[in-house]
Image (spheres, rainbow, N blue to C red):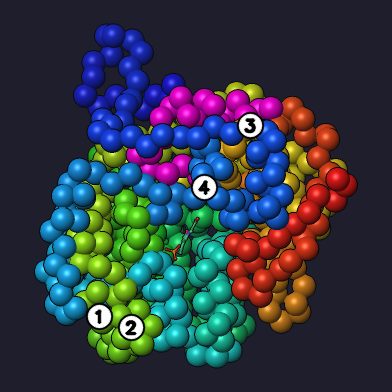
Amino acid sequence: MTHFEPQTMGQQFGRRSWAEPWKIKMVEPLRVTDRDTRERALDEAGYNTFLLRSRDVYIDLLTDSGTSAMSDRQWAGMMMGDEAYAGSVNFFHLESAIQHYYGYRHILPTHQGRGAEHLLSRAAIKPGQLVPGNMYFTTTRAHQELAGGEFADVVIDQAHDPDDPHPFKGNVDLDKLDTLIATRGAANIAYVSLAATVNMAGGQPVSMANAKALKALCERHEIKVYLDATRLVENAFFIQERELGYQATRIADIVKEFTSHTDGAWSSAKKDSLVNIGGWLAVNEWPLFEELRNQIVLFEGLHTYGGLAGRDMEAMAIGIAESMQDDHIRSRIGQVRYLGELLTDWEVPIVHPVGGHAIFLNARAFYPQLSQDEFPAQTLAAELYLDSGIRSMERGVVSAGRDPKTGGHHYPNLELTRLTIPRRVYTQAHMDVVAESVKTVWDNRTAATGLEMIYEPKYLRFFQARFKPRHG
Ligand code: PLI
């Protein structure tokens, strides 16, 4: 059991555990399948967990995106949807929630995170410009490249090492950025794309000091900083825990201080904000907002609904407020850590420190016999599904895709399989079952022979690529 410093309990009773700050009101049955069924399902899915039918999955750790359980208050809010085409009351609730908690001036709802990425990239990148960022994210980089931008990785080197214990592995390397500005010129930089936390590094946080120093550096060169705030609340938890001076600061205040070091943000509300669909884009600067507000009507919908129903915006407004509660975020990350500690005790190789939303298995360490062209992380996701019906996601060479200039694979140092924990959905007993299945796959690791890609789509190939076993 993971322990946090008890806030309200006396020490005289010895051991005191944390627990979820909610109880369960409605349940959804799970289906357990046998191995034959799973073998057939995986074969039909081309050994890609994205192509499985969810009815063939037992514990679904594909993603924490849109998979949260909503609260009774959020469901009540859904019933208060104002489905007017224009000027829905729910839009104004959402706008106030984002202004209040994130502190930005001008807000647009979008159907999800990538809708916001699309709009920002079109409006703020000129073809040929660089977009430095603290490690790539799949959809973010894809939209930057589609807009003619070139992504440049400026995350600290420690982020690429699964074992490095740095407490803020998501930090921007300010020297790398400075060099980029000096060699390419500030005018050739569209903006800095800052993610908090960094998904592909293992859900690793950015420190407040780093965000502040980044803003100061960028201001000197008149470069804007736009934030991917998708998991900023999780990032704030790590600041509260690890950064000197923040232990007594509320999560909501840390979030607001962090965003004050940026010029705007986008978010997939399907993560931190506890909804099944939705996103937003927010900036402080008027001319940019005017351009975005004009573009949104082409791609998402009117600026007061952005592709969402009124009820979705209401659920998002309530979810934003719930996500900022200190006890919520402590139990959310506590559950991720519980799984991480079980695996660490059994010496299963995972990314350390454990991040905010997932456990990332180090597939290179599972399968040293496989080269990256044999897709170790995809293989590990397949083996885990075959063992128990648990669904995970590849976050290695398949996700990294191809370099648009050379056409060759990107070969990331991190070859990971992600066990992503939906919010408020599974119990600690489910985490035990997951850990035991991972341990079985770890014990059988020498038998794995890898996969061959037999179909590769042009964009974001990890979603729809198909594979077959190399020997089998
Ligand atoms: O899936 P969207 O379009 O709502 O959001 C895209 C997106 C943007 N930024 C970050 C950091 C993400 O993690 C993200 C989506 N992530 C998914 C789907 C995931 O499984 O991690």
**x%, y% of residue 294?**
30, 89
Residue under the image location 40 percent in, 49 percent down: 67
Amino acid type assigned to the residue bearing label 1 in the image: His
The residue at which mark 2 appears reads as: 296
- Pick whichever of labels 1 and 4 is earlier in the sequence: 4
Q: Quadrant of the C terminus?
A: top right
Amino acid type assigned to the residue bearing label 2 in the image: Ile
- Above or below, 66 against 361 in this view is below
- Above or below, 324 against 90 in this view is above
**x%, y% of residue 183?**
62, 83
Amino acid type assigned to the residue bearing label 4 in the image: Ser
State whether residue 127 appears in this view.
Answer: yes
Q: Quadrant of the N terminus?
A: top left
* Residues at circles 2 and 4 in contact by the CB criterion of under 8 Å: no
**x%, y% of residue 151?**
58, 75
Depth order, front residue of 52/414: 52
Residue under the image location 59 percent in, 37 percent down: 389
The residue at which mark 1 appears reads as: 303
* Residues at circles 3 and 4 in contact by the CB criterion of under 8 Å: no
The residue at which mark 3 appears reads as: 34
Residue under the image location 25 percent in, 86 percent down: 286
Residue 424 painted magenta? yes
**Disc 1: residue Cβ within 8 A of ligand 1's nearest atom:** no
- Above or below, 10 against 48 in this view is above
C-alpha distance separating marks 3 and 4: 15 Å
**x%, y% of residue 103?**
22, 65
- Pick whichever of labels 1 and 2 is earlier in the sequence: 2
Q: Which mark is residue 54?
A: 4
Q: Residue furthest top?
A: 13
User: Residue 264 lies in what quarter of the image?
Assistant: bottom left
Disc 2 is placed on an element classified as: helix
